[in-house]
Amino acid sequence: STLGTQAIQYGWITGEQDMRTASEMLTAMLNRAAVTLSPIQKGPDIVLSGGNLTAKIATNTATWNTVRSFYQRRHSGIPINDSVLQWEVTLDAFAGGAADAVAFGLARNSGVLNDILSTNGWGYKFEGGASYMITPGTVSTATTPNWVGAAGDVFSLSFDLSNHRLAVYKNGVALGASTLEAVAAPNNRVMPAVSIKRNSGAVVTQFTMNLGATPFKYP
């Protein structure tokens, strides 16, 4: 059944059509069960694996593909304020060519899936050897210094519900000029999301998301 988004102690419930019943979703959330990427809310070229926590584009395509999570909650072992939501994105494979790109952040559930998440969301991307902050309407602002990612990098994100701030860290280090305000987020159904595209040839673009089912690498 469909549930609306709620900012409660354990995190978010999405407003998407979940494969589970409402009772199962609530039970999973209250038991702090594993949260995964959604096999429903994903672009056509994205392939999920690893219990729906790993996503890749295995074929060359110049088109962005986005995948969103069911919902997000903080990891129970991390002593942070309940109003702060955290998750990590590990870049498993990335060629880094001019036509390869990754974006991650928060997306409304009304955003299109065969495009970048910032058509209706907020976050960060690296593309063509440069890094950017992105806001709704696909507006990109270059970051200084450049913090483009490579295979093996872990990007940690946190969203503070009290001031609507979304921040990003690379391998545990806070990135300069990397905090943006998702001004509409508290009044919309939003969830962690990643967008990827690949057009480099042999190297598959792939990431794994940790939404709190296991301890974070950089808490």
Image (spheres, grey):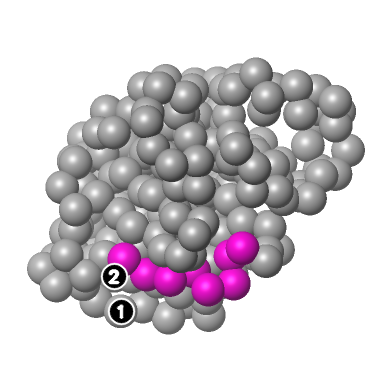
- What segment carries the magenta color? 179-186
Separation of marks 2 and 1 at Cα, in angstroms: 5 Å
* Circle nearer the N terminus (2, 1): 2
What residue is shown at x 37% (from left), y 70% (from top)? 180
What residue is shown at x 85% (from left), y 44% (from top)? 2
Q: Is the residue marked by circle 1 packed among few (<14), some (14-19), or many (20+) residues within 10 Å? A: few
Residue at the extreme left of the image, as rendered: 145
What residue is shown at x 29% (from left), y 33% (from top)? 219
Q: Is the residue marked by circle 2 packed among few (<14), some (14-19), or many (20+) residues within 10 Å? A: many
Residue 10 placed where, x, y %?
Answer: 59, 34
Q: Is residue 11 left or right of residue 5?
A: left
Q: What is the three-letter code of the residue carrying label 1?
A: Thr
Determine whether the residue tagged by mark 2 lies in a helix, strand or loop. strand
What residue is shown at x 59% (from left), y 22% (from top)? 32
Mark 1 highlights which residue? Answer: 141
Q: Is residue 137 left or right of residue 1?
A: left
Q: Do the numbered discs 2 and 1 sit on residues whose CB atoms are within 8 Å?
A: yes
- Res. 180 visible in picture: yes
Residue 113 placed where, x, y %?
Answer: 62, 58
Query: In the image, which disc is placed on residue 32?
Result: none
The question of residue 206 being in magenta is answered with no
- How many numbered badges does the structure rendering display? 2
Mark 2 highlights which residue? Answer: 132
Q: What is the three-letter code of the residue carrying label 2?
A: Tyr
Q: Nearer the viewer, residue 166 or 44?
A: 166
Q: Nearer the viewer, residue 49 or 24?
A: 24
Determine whether the residue tagged by mark 1 lies in a helix, strand or loop. strand
State the image quarter where residue 73 is shown.
Answer: top right
- Res. 59 visible in picture: no
